[in-house]
Image (cartoon, rainbow, N blue to C red):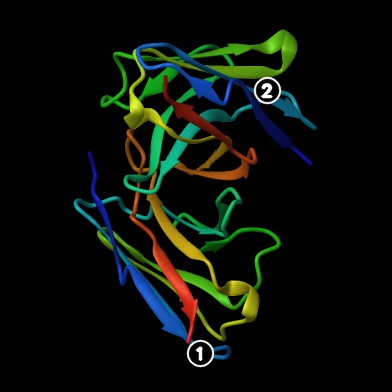
Amino acid sequence: DIQMTQSPSSLSASVGDRVTITCRASQNIISYLNWYQQKPGKAPNLLIYASANLQSGVPSRFSGSGSETDFTLTISSLQPEDFATYFCQQTYSTPYTFGQGTKLEIK
Amino acid sequence: QVQLQESGPGLVKPSGTLSLTCVVSGGSISTTNWWNWVRQTPGKGLEWIGEIYHSGTTNYNPSLKSRVTISVDKSKNQFSLKLSSVTAADTAVYYCARDSCSGGSCYSAYWGQGTLVTVSS
């Protein structure tokens, strides 16, 4: 299985901050990397697919980049509704695997 | 707008079989999409269980393959999950999701709301 490692596991930030979350794959996954946001009691919500493509309806303050083994999710200016947990997922090969999550909390 | 809704027992006895159904509305299950099951626990996070195409082709997580069956019922526009010989470790929130694939990249833009299944006697 391809292992996905996110960092940091948790992060405290303030409204208006620029935040970057990193995801590393245990092998080359080209650009088959998705990012999801999850709020308590809710299903994951797709933000970015194929590393850098913004899902329809997702605010432009979210962006993704990277290829092969190293990927980043950036939120350019944190809004109150962005405090949530973020997961990366590789879909290069089955079994698809997720990172362990990054919990973004209010400072 | 595609919507997915999981249903099934919230409590399953150890060694029993967990059975869930995902009803798809707002679109046909017979489209060029894969239909997934994913579960989530506090300890292991998000775990991909497997997927099915409307033709019946399946892919399973090898860690669960011996116990998992995913099937599709096109007449009812739904797909199902069966997980046998369950233990407390199978207690989780179970999600169904629709994968879209483009240029070789797949992603889940549509999810059910999730259903908690507890394995306990």
Kind of residue sitting beneath label 2: Ile
In the rendered structure, the answer to whether residue B11 lies left or right of residue B66 reads right
What's the mark number on residue B29? 2
Q: Is residue A84 above or below residue A25?
A: below
Q: Residue at x 41, y 11 (%)?
A: B16
Q: Residue at x 59, y 20 (%)?
A: B9
In the rendered structure, the answer to whether residue A98 lies left or right of residue A5 reads right
Q: Quote the CA–CA distance across marks 1 and 2.
A: 42 Å
Q: Name the image quarter holding residue B34.
A: top right
From the top left corner, tell me how far across and down residue B21 is, in percent.
61, 20
Q: Name the image quarter holding residue A72.
A: bottom left
Mark 1 surroundings: few (<14), some (14-19) or many (≥20) residues within 10 A:
few
Q: Are marks 1 and 2 in contact (CB under 8 Å)?
A: no
Q: Circle 1 is placed at which residue position?
A: A17
Mark 2 belongs to chain: B
From the top left corner, tell me how far across and down residue B45 is, in percent.
37, 48
Where disc 1 sits, the SS reads loop
From the top left corner, tell me how far across and down residue A55 is, in percent.
61, 58
Mark 2 surroundings: few (<14), some (14-19) or many (≥20) residues within 10 A:
many
Where disc 2 sits, the SS reads loop
Q: Is residue A77 above or below residue A8?
A: below
Q: Is residue B74 above or below residue A1?
A: above
Q: Name the image quarter holding residue B99.
A: top right
In the rendered structure, the answer to whether residue B4 lies left or right of residue B18 reads right
In which quadrant of the rendered image does the N terminus of chain B lie?
top right
Q: Residue at x 44, y 18 (%)?
A: B58
| A77 or A63: nearer the viewer | A77
Q: Residue at x 64, y 41 (%)?
A: B113
